[in-house]
Amino acid sequence: MEQCGGTIGKTTFPNGKVLIFRDVRYPYEYFGSFKNNRRVIQDYPKGVPELRREVLFRSENMTAGELDAVMRQLILKHRSNDPNIGYNLRPAHHQH
């Protein structure tokens, strides 16, 4: 597999909810796709105000699959797939 590297970051919205994202571009210039995210649209029907962003993980020599695995772990750690906490739609959140 080809090594690509990339960044995994967290965007925090004004309501405190978070979105974990992956960017394979270097330097980090992408802040998570939320324009078509139904949860974001529901909370911000008139558009999203100022956001806070931070880098959670960065690597220059991982494959896309390895980065996806780290992102999945971070989504679960931050519980950003729980609609009460975040905007990640995958992996699906299962209520207990």
Image (spheres, rainbow, N blue to C red):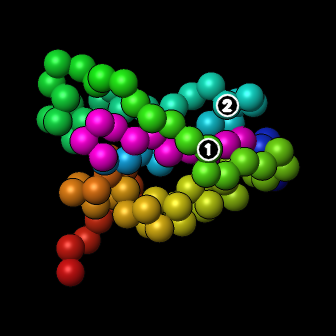
Q: Is residue 40 above or below residue 55?
A: above
- Numbered disc 1: secondary structure: strand
Say the numbered circle drawn on residue 38: none
From the top left corner, tell me how far across and down residue 37 is, in percent: 29, 36
The quadrant in which residue 55 appears is top right
The answer to which of 46 and 25 lies nearer the viewer is 46
Are the residues tagged 2 and 1 within 8 Å (C-beta)? Answer: yes
* Residue ID at (17%, 36%): 43
**15 to the left or right of 22:** left
Q: Is residue 43 magenta?
A: no
Q: CA distance from mark 2 to mark 1?
A: 9 Å
* Residue 86 visible within the image: yes
* Residue ID at (25%, 41%): 15
**Badge 2 or badge 1: first in the primary sequence:** 2
* Residue 89 visible within the image: no
Amino acid identity at mark 2: Tyr
From the top left corner, tell me how far across and down residue 91 is, in percent: 39, 60
Furthest toward the top, the residue is: 46
Q: Look at the image and give the residue range highlighted in magenta.
A: 6-16
Amino acid identity at mark 1: Val
* Residue ID at (67%, 43%): 7
Q: Is residue 67 above or below residue 76?
A: above
Residue with the mark numbered 1: 55
Furthest toward the bottom, the residue is: 96
**28 to the left or right of 44:** right
Residue with the mark numbered 2: 28
